[in-house]
Amino acid sequence: MKVLKFGGTSVQSASMMKKVSDIISSEDAQIIVLSAMSGITNQLLAITNHLQKNEISKCLEILEKVNLAHHTVIYELLSDETHRKKAIQNIQFYIERAKQLIQQSLNKQIANELLSFGEQMSTSIFYEYQMMLGRKVYFLPALNFMRLNADKEPDMQKINVLLQNLIPNTSAGELYITQGFIALNENDEIDNLGRGGSDYSATIIGAALQADVIEIWTDIDGVHNNDPRYVENTFPLRELSYNEAAELAYFGAKILHPTCIVPAQKTKIPIFLKNTMEPMAAGTIITQNSNKQNIKAIAAKDGIIAIRIHSSRMLNAYGFLRKVFEIFEKHKTPIDLITTSEVSVSVTIDDDKQLFEILNELKDFGTVEVDRNQSIICIVGDFLAANKGIVAQILNSINEIPLRMVSYGGSDNNISLLLNCDDKIRTLKLLNSRLFTKQVDEIFKQN
Ligand code: ASP
Ligand code: MG
């Protein structure tokens, strides 16, 4: 059995839904996980923001756009009267429910219910389409099995039991259509796995049902060696290991939800990244081991804050770092990079919600400096210490860029650089042209 997840752009129009339908016509039993149509979750989020300011007419205006977007797809996709009517009724149900919610004052539950409608609507249209085509299709509401625990993490035990009860066995050609992103929390309220969480839904389902493969279908032909939004002549990577993919996804490769690697890695199920626009393109396969390459790929993440704590009390002391880290723990703020010297430590965070409180407590330890607007550039490859000269090669290729932090040695496959956000694009370009010369030459030859 396979799990196939299609992102927002893959279901954004009738013609894209037809492409998706062609892709899933193979013989295996398949669980189809869909995102909301492209842009819809953002619009639902905008509704919650307006609702918070009590701007009801703005909410209704956006809701009408959401309604229209879905109706357009229905009219173009569903030629059969009965299925079209059914789909319209379904969309109407969510739009009416949204109107009810908009009459109330906003709270977390209302916001989460509104945010869930994107996936509920896209799947209900796609399900009707598959029914119209006469496929052996079942609707599998995510709220019937996707459960979060008190920490808002997927409750794998509950999910396993519920899913295995819902789908005890499958046979060839069966399709199960379900929503990505949405879940019920420990209080049985509608909740979600966070933005971009549909990838995570797919790997959670894949792990629970021990799928043969989890395919993530998007609008790009796999993970690229560098960020194609900023750099020319990037190229797709054929293979990545789970660890490499996790580093790249966490440090900015927008193609994958960072946490989605975890369930697949635990159960050793391969993740295949494919392009809905070009189904025949090779894509990227993510497994336990991948081809080793000195320097494989680069990703960048913005909005990073660097904090340096300088204290002579650190000299020859033990337990100092623990006390520093406890402050971040207390304020539920993850640290990404760390570098230390004998008398100071620098850390980076990307969540500034508790920054004020954190800085206040850190001041007790010594002098604290904060740099905002930083970017992390993460370089993934095979950086075993025995593999001499690679760090020098990376740093030489960007010797005109001021670096705030360099983190090497944390793992064998990651080097991270911290620099000013304004230098990010220049750095990405320099790294691409100087570290991937051979591959870039190949691209030139082909063009
Ligand atoms: N629709 C949700 C979002 O836009 C989840 C997803 O697409 O992965 O974040
Ligand atoms: Mg996504």
Image: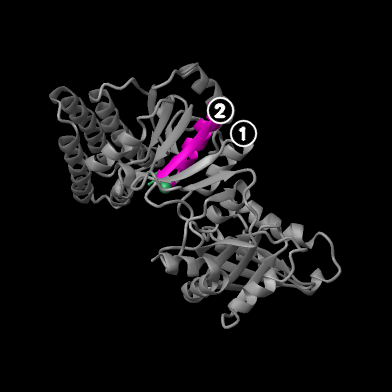
Q: In the orientation shown, which residue stands out farthest toward the front?
A: 445
Return the disc, 2 or 1, that comes first in the chain's sequence.
2
Q: In which quadrant will I find the C terminus?
A: bottom left
Residue 211 falls inside the magenta stretch: yes
Residue at the left extreme, as displayed = 81
Segment colored magenta: 195-217
Q: Within 10 angstroms of label 2, few (less than 14), some, or many (20 or more) residues?
A: some
| Residue 375 drawn in magenta | no
Whole-percent x and y of residue 28? 44, 26
Residue that appears at 65% across and 60% down: 414
Residue 292 visible to the viewer: yes
Residue neighbourhood size for the residue with mark 1, other residues' Cα within 10 Å, grouped as few (<14), some (14–19), many (≥20): some
x then y, percent, for residue 45 = 33, 48
- Tell me how far mark 2 sits from mark 1, CA to CA: 7 Å
Q: Identify the residue under disc 1.
A: 267
Figure check: 268 above or below 248: above
